[in-house]
Amino acid sequence: MKLIKSLQVAAFGTAIAALLIGCSSKGNERVEAEGDKDVRKVKVAYVQSSKPVTYTDENGNAAGYDVEVLKAVDELLPQYEFDFVGTSDDDLLVGVEQGKYQLGVKNAFWTEERTAKFIYPKEFVGLSSTGLVLKKENEAVKTLEDFASADFSLAPIAANNAQYTVIAEHNEAHPDNPVNLKAGDTFSIDVVQWVNEGRVDGAVIIEASFNRQVTAEDGPYHHLKDDVVYNEFAVIKTWPLFNKKEQELADAFDIALKQVKEQKIPNDLSKEFYGRDLFELLDTVER
């Protein structure tokens, strides 16, 4: 989705200009723009294999919901040029923290631990349907409370994965009926296969990943579409992560993203990439 560049000046005027005056070039490439203005190149990390949230398409270009929202934001920030760099979950987190990238997008949830390492902007970038993948025979298990009451086993989740925090927070709120939560050794595992093989009773997965792997006709587990189910238990806000030294960039990003939301661009992108407008559920979102 593209925005007309001519919207930039009218959209922001003095508000965005004030934020960007004196933008430091230290540690980041700058190139001359038209007139006397400079354009600061910003490296934006994205996970390459998380379709439809973020991925590299068949032409080698950055794509996905998060990427397209950030492209719309970039259109409204004439002093910045976003350079999208495909990478892995782990490299994104380490790279943004260390300043290799100025920001990153990966369907990231908010966690208290991450606030010590990253800047979270005021504006969230999207919404993520999060649920359980279960065998068809267990489809009556709709909530985490149901799952815990059934004494089901959950696939391990890496402690640095925000999904771990979501389950840990649930357990804190339900100490008499906690989910059996175990920390995994890797950031992500093949949860659909683990459930299908019976290694665990269920696993946490986002709807977009389930649809890509199971629902889609070209998905690697489409042959299991009648054997496993996805039961949503929460819709959760997702955020871009900024390097701790990038408060000025994050502030400018907030102004631009707010306008992008006013134009309902994320709503349209949600329907395009996720098949439904998750923003219609915003009033029910607790996290």
Image: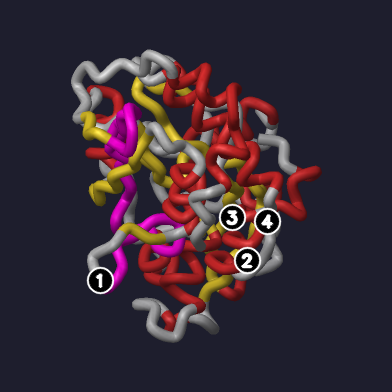
Specify the amino acid type for callout 1.
Asn
Disc ID at residue 59: 1
Q: Is residue 172 magenta?
A: no
Please state the horizontal and vertical placement of residue 140, each as a whole percent of the image: 70, 66
Mark nearest the camera among 2 and 1 is 1
Nearest to N terminus: mark 2 or mark 1:
1
Nearest to N terminus: mark 1 or mark 4:
1
Nearest to N terminus: mark 3 or mark 4:
3
Q: What residue would you read off at disc 4? A: 278
Disc ID at residue 131: 3
Please rate how many residues cluster around mark 3, counting C-alpha atoms within 10 Å: few if below 14, some from 14 to 19, many from 20.
many
Nearest to N terminus: mark 3 or mark 1:
1
Start-end of magenta stretch: 33-58
Q: CA distance from mark 3 to mark 1?
A: 31 Å
- Residue at disc 2, secondary structure: helix
- Quarter-wise, where is residue 199 in the image? bottom left
- Residue at disc 4, secondary structure: helix
- Residue at disc 3, secondary structure: strand
Please state the horizontal and vertical placement of residue 25, each as a whole percent of the image: 25, 20
Please state the horizontal and vertical placement of residue 258, each as a whole percent of the image: 64, 37
Q: CA distance from mark 3 to mark 2?
A: 19 Å
Please state the horizontal and vertical placement of residue 257, each as a whole percent of the image: 58, 39
Q: What residue would you read off at disc 2? A: 271
Specify the amino acid type for callout 4.
Leu
Furthest toward the right, the residue is 283
Q: Is residue 91 above or below residue 22?
A: below
